Image: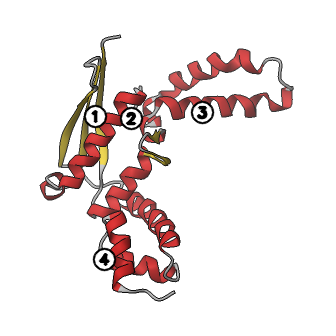
Amino acid sequence: MPITAETVKTLRDRTGISVMECKKALEEAGGDIEKALVVLSRRSAEIARKKGERALGAGAVASYVHSNAQIGTLVLLSCETDFVSKNEDFAKLAYDIAMHAAASRPQYIRREEVGEAGLAALREMFLPDVQDKPENLREQILTGKVGARLKEIVLLDQLFIKDDSKTIADLLSAATQKFGERVDVSQLACFSVR
């Protein structure tokens, strides 16, 4: 399939990623836009991993209060420079994460925050569920149940409410690729009347 300027523009409009990166992805995917999206997704994870240690010196605070005024969140989405933090798409991402957090009410931002004691408590919670299972499968079932629970309570592991084909971590990886610098959720606060 030929790679035209229109094809590159279509991919850029869908992703917001630079023209050169879109063109490279299309070349690798043989001109297929859907395959190029997969290529870009794979690259975004690699780029985010490489930039994972960079200092975050800028960012934006976004808030979301649900229409019933019973639930609200504050999110600090951090980045490396003021240039990115003032970008309209960056502010929209921060708002989307705040809205997602209001709907999903995560207890932690990342798995590391759960800690050994938290993981032990989760295992204890699910032990009664696996007692009647075959002994050789108990550990596997228990690990699966703990993993599923972590996906419910850890923000970065949750499926994004607007697109359940992506996790919040995937959104941050894509933003890192799009903006060319590290993007991460630094702080999160959820408030609820009930």
Q: Nearer the viewer, mark 3 or mark 1?
A: 3
Q: Amino acid at mark 3?
A: Ala
Location of mark 3 (residue): 148
Q: Position of residue 81 (x, y in %)?
A: 16, 56
Q: Position of residue 33 (x, y in %)?
A: 47, 73
Numbered mark located on residue 19 in the image: 4
Tag 1 near tag 4, CB within 8 Å: no
Q: Secondary structure at mark 4?
A: helix
Number of marks in picture? 4
**Residue plotted at (81% across, 32% down):** 137
Q: Nearer the viewer, mark 4 or mark 2?
A: 4
Location of mark 2 (residue): 109
Tell me the distance, in whole angstroms, between the alpha carbons under discs 3 and 2: 16 Å
**Residue plotted at (52% across, 86% down):** 1
Tell me the distance, in whole angstroms, between the alpha carbons under discs 1 and 2: 8 Å
Local crowd size for mark 1, using a 10 Å CA cut-off: few (<14), some (14–19), many (≥20) = few
Q: Position of residue 140 (x, y in %)?
A: 74, 34
Q: Is residue 80 left or right of residue 154?
A: left
Q: Earlier in the sequence, mark 4 or mark 2?
A: 4
Q: Secondary structure at mark 1?
A: strand
Q: Quadrant of residue 8?
A: bottom left
Local crowd size for mark 2, using a 10 Å CA cut-off: few (<14), some (14–19), many (≥20) = many
Tell me the distance, in whole angstroms, between the alpha carbons under discs 3 and 1: 23 Å
